[in-house]
Image (cartoon, rainbow, N blue to C red):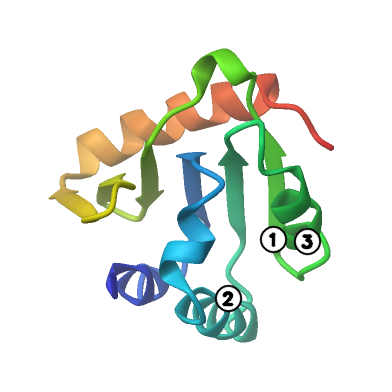
Amino acid sequence: MNYQFQLLEYKEPIFVFGIPKAAPDTLKDRIMIFHKERIKRKIAMFHIYNFEALERIRFLNTLLYTYGKYIDEKLKSLVSTAICGDEVFFTLWTQEVLIIRIKNKLLADSYKKYYKFLWKLAIKP
């Protein structure tokens, strides 16, 4: 799960969508350590959570360089997608977390365009 810290090396915004409500609980204290380091480096992070995570989204929106929205319940997913730099990470949030990492500029650029489209449709709490 240390891929989050690898993303900071790009010094670029981080985009994540499809995040289930349970994801922060799975990451426990590590996620706040990551956010503290990310904020210290002034790296923006944009989150699109599943609809049931309103409390988490409201919390994230209080952090510097951090923006959160949610998507309609019809799009609920156990798979999140993180995009930063030339990398795309797919995370399956089950009891045994599975992460697939692909490093490819064309793929990452395509997913960033897709993310920007989703961001416009996502709902701010």
Query: Could you say which quadrant of the image residue 125 lies in?
Result: top right
Q: Residue 80's spot in the image, x, y percent?
A: 39, 41
Contact? badges 1 and 2 (CB < 8 Å): yes
Residue 65 vs residue 93: left or right? Answer: right
Who is closer to the viewer here, 37 or 23? 23
Q: Give neighbour class at mark 2: few <14, some 14-19, many 20+ (Cα, 10 Å).
A: many
Q: Secondary structure at mark 3?
A: helix
Is 123 drawn above or below residue 6 in the view shown?
above
Question: Is residue 10 positioned above or below 119 on the image?
Answer: below
Dividing the picture into quarters, in which one does residue 112 lie? top left
Residue tagged by mark 2?
35
Please state if 87 lies on the left or on the right of 20 as rendered.
left
Query: Mark 1 and mark 2: span between their CA atoms?
Result: 9 Å
Position in image of residue 62 (x %, y %)? 83, 65
Q: Which residue is mark 3?
A: 59
Please state, as top left, top right, bottom left or bottom right, where the N terminus lies in the image.
Answer: bottom left
Helix, strand or loop under label 2 = helix
Q: Position of residue 46 (x, y in %)?
A: 60, 50
Q: Residue furthest front?
A: 95
Nearer to me, 95 or 112: 95
Mark 2–mark 3 Cα distance, whole angstroms, equals 12 Å
Horizontal side of residue 110 vs 35, given as left or right:
left
Binning the other alpha carbons within 10 Å of mark 3 as few (below 14), some (14 to 19) or many (20 upward) gives few
Q: Which of the marked residues, 1 or 2, is nearer the chain's N terminus?
A: 2
Residue for badge 1: 66
What residue is rendered at 50% in x and 52% in y?
A: 22
**Label whose residue precedes the other's in the sequence (2 or 3):** 2
From the viewer's perspective, is the residue at label 2 or at label 3 nearer?
A: 3
Residue 106, above or below 87: above
Examine the rendered structure and indicate whether residue 78 appears above or below residue 32. above
What amino acid does circle 2 point to?
His
